[in-house]
Amino acid sequence: MNVRYAIDARWYGAAASGVATYAHTLLLGLVEVVPGERITVITNRRGALPPEIASHAAFQWIELPGNPMSIRHQRLMPRIARDLNIACLHSIDLHAPLAGRFRKVITCHDLIPLVLPHRVAGGAKARYKAVWRLWVQLQLAQADRVIAISQCSQRDIIEKIHLPAERISVVPAALYRPASNQPAHAERVERDPRLEFLQPMILSVGRRAPYKNLSGLLRGFHELIKSCSVDARLVITGALDRRYPEPEQLAERLGIAERVIFTGYLSDASLHDLYQRARMFVCPSLYEGFGLPVLEAMAAGIPVICSNRASLPEVCGNAAIMIDPENPAEMARAMQQILTDGEMANRLAELGRRRAAEFTPRRMAEALLPIYRSLV
């Protein structure tokens, strides 16, 4: 059997994550640009994948449960590639097999533990930074082509790993959730009773890691409450993380705990429901390799306030209010503007829809396909 190129998507199906979303959009895009061609995909667990992907006739699946970075996987992957006679393997994250006689494309989403180590101090990558740096260097050194999902990520790879720019291609990530009034998958939405209120909802989506700057968001919201009479609520979604209890503690200290709702992890359908109901979306992050939730909010027609750091300005373009994420007063003024200026809010919403429409799975696949073909 000969396989021209295969997708090494071993984190896909293991857990919900930005990397899993990247795999999803890549596969959707490849189906559009290589119709009739069989695509080999290596994944952790096919049964956990969305049905429109798992049952698609275009894909040949190989299930390989376990940690893609384990010694076991490092031994098995070259054997699988040899048996399938794979010419080019695209790893969607930094977990490519170090051995094997085939061409390799590796996507590097970000280098946050190397760029902002003090902002991810609770994670293993930051605690063992030297080991992780070595792993990244080994991964990227062997790649025939490295894919950066933003110009910001490309700059970080050049600066922190010293990889030549000519070996890196910038291919932006894509948005797969439709900008309609329906979730991507038919799914019952069970609403949290805490979210059944009439006041304006300010929404933020993301993990608990300190670089997401939830403390800055809470201080900005506190400034808004002090300076504006509107009875708004701040809703923060994302999996709870016991390593980072500071957001709830800060909300209590600031006296705004009754106005702040931490939902924990939400399904796609429940999150989509919140996007439809929110008055605005705020991304206060100090760093993002790309920042997909910003585009999700734009696609849903919500005005966006966004940090002016890292990749976020290049992703947002002119479709968001850009703020200094470490200036609570500036953040509060931006939120008050959207709450009080309907014309500006509508303009931002329309600009956001147009901007989100530029980041399609097809466009991403069309940029990657020539790279694959140049290597086989």
Image: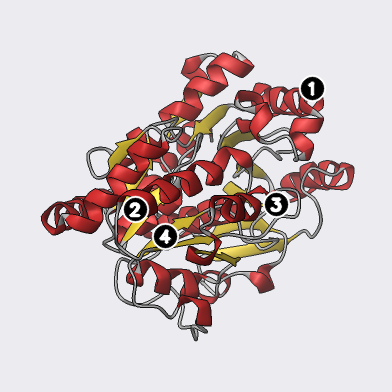
First in sequence: mark 1 vs mark 2: 1
Q: Is residue 273 left or right of residue 129?
A: left
Amino acid type, label 1: Ala
Q: Which mark is residue 203?
A: 4
Q: Whole-Å distance between the Cαs marked 4 and 2? A: 24 Å
Is 178 left, or right, of 241 in this rendering? left
Q: Amino acid at mark 4?
A: Leu
Cα distance in 3D space between marks 1 and 3: 27 Å
Please give the residue where the numbered disc 3 appears in the rendered image: 245
Crowdedness of circle 3 by 10 Å Cα count: few (<14), some, many (20+)?
Answer: few
Within 10 angstroms of label 4, few (less than 14), some, or many (20 or more) residues?
Answer: many
Q: CA distance from mark 1 to mark 2?
A: 36 Å
In the image, 263 versus 60, the foreground residue is 263
Q: Residue at x 60, y 24 (%)?
A: 115
Q: Secondary structure at mark 1?
A: helix
Q: Quadrant of residue 368?
A: top left
Q: What residue is disc 1 on?
A: 130
The answer to whether mark 1 and mark 3 are in CB contact below 8 A is no
Residue 361 in sight from this viewpoint: no
Residue reaching furthest to the left = 343
